[in-house]
Amino acid sequence: MNSAANASTNFPPRNKMGTEPVGRLLITMSLPIMFSMIIEALYNVVDSMFVSRLSENALTAVSLAFPMHMLLISVTIGTSVGISACLSRKLGAGDQKGVAGAAGNGLFLALMSYAVFLVFAIFLTKPYFASQTQDAEIYQMGVEYLFICMAFSFGSILQITFQRILQATGRTTLSMVSQLAGAAFNIIFDPLLIFGLLGFPRMGVRGAAIATVGGQFLGLCLAAFFNFTKNKEVHFSFRGLKPEKHIIGTIYRVGAPAIVNQGLNSLMAFGVNFILIGISSTAVAAFGIYIKIQNFIFLPVYGLNNGVIAITAFNYGSREKKRIQASMKFGMIYAISMMLTGTIVLQLLARPIFSLFGTSLELMNAGVGIMRVISLGFVIVAFLFISQGIFQALGNGLYSLIVALLQVVVILLPLLYIFAKVFELRFIWWAFIAAQSIAAVAAAFLLKNIYSQKVKPLE
């Protein structure tokens, strides 16, 4: 009893995640993250805009590389979700040693993740592209782009890890600043290195990759600096990097399903590209552009979801039932509102948005068809995002995994393959709506179940 009391005195007794009104808290915590993710999505869109002006083959090469980039981000974000949830629960319980252990082991796992992707860059980049295209130009540009992104991915992996530690302790503004700086670097140096402006060499898609990893490295430096100098609730040390089995197990009980869950987005993109390349490279390029535009809408909701996870996990650790309920309610309301707005914008402005990429008429028509159909399911996706975040925050990432597997593996990819054989290109995108609708029904059932098991019994 005394040890628990002493542990609690190591932290400020009234952390804002346990005291401020939840609706306002969710906005103040999530807005910096959402803003930074909008900027990140913006520079991804700008990246595609510049590459599309090289050639359609260059755009196709970058689109075929995108699933591996998504896999890297999925592994990193999934692990960071586990770190963030573990950290937030330890903060809520006042366990200083547990907080330090979660942060140190989280950094160790990030370094191990980078080692895996470095091995991929060296040995598997060429086989990966050879499995997707026989076009020599697309193959060469894709290999150049992907090798640089994977071989120097330590900037992206460690940047995201440090940013999630900042977010888990409520320092979302500092996280935003680091991400904003990296995005600005990418936006500035993309055209300089791609087209050889202001005395820089003309490097094509290699320039886009170098600008990307350069921005990630800058973001890493700032995020690490803020953690070491401003984050007083987390104490970093080399000794903390020593792996501890029980802490890693705690992180991956939430993080592993989140990795697989996020990784299914990479599988989805790879599967869709594999199906579309049998139709035409134009279809692959159109879907690649659409994914970047979709991320511009989805990533802010991911940012909101990070706030929901942190607040829900913190208050679950401190057993505050009403605050957990409020976090769930406001998370759903805000996410649905944001995604509904995204649907309206894409329905009304699909053609002007796609014209920003300077595409051919065939590519534009394909892209506009994708945008107008898939965006109809955005409200359903909002419900899925927040439900999966709640599952992760309450320590049951398996539910999140079940929903994602059902949506992508069981329904979407098989249905998309069948539609591609039976229908014209403009009709196959309805497979996304069908998969999301069925997954939402399953998520609602599991949400009711986890609420009854873990939230309802709390005083």
Image (cartoon, helix red, strand yellow):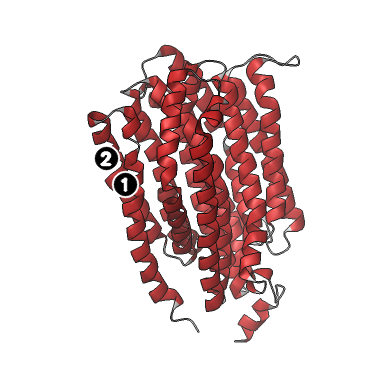
In this orientation, does residue 65 appear?
no
Residue 66 position in % (x across, y down)? 47, 32
Q: Residues within 10 Å of mark 2 (few under 14, many from 20)?
A: some
x 55%, y 52%: residue: 338
> From this viewpoint, which residue is outermost toward the bottom?
1
Reply above or below: 208 against 85.
above
- Specify which label sits upstream in the sequence, 1 or 2: 2
Residue 172 position in % (x across, y down)? 68, 55
Residue 81 disc label: none
Pointer 1 residue: 434
Q: Nearer the viewer, residue 128 or 103?
A: 128
Image quarter of residue 209 = top right
Q: Nearer the viewer, residue 138 or 449?
A: 449
x 52%, y 32%: residue: 150
Contact, mark 1 vs mark 2 (Cβ under 8 Å):
yes
Image quarter of residue 5 = bottom right
- Judged left or right of residue 422, residue 312 is right
Kind of residue indicated by mark 2 = Leu
Reply above or below: 100 against 14.
above
In this orientation, does residue 30 appear?
yes
Kind of residue indicated by mark 1 = Ala
Marks 1/2: CA distance? Answer: 9 Å
Q: How many marks?
A: 2
Reply above or below: 111 against 80.
above
Pointer 2 residue: 415
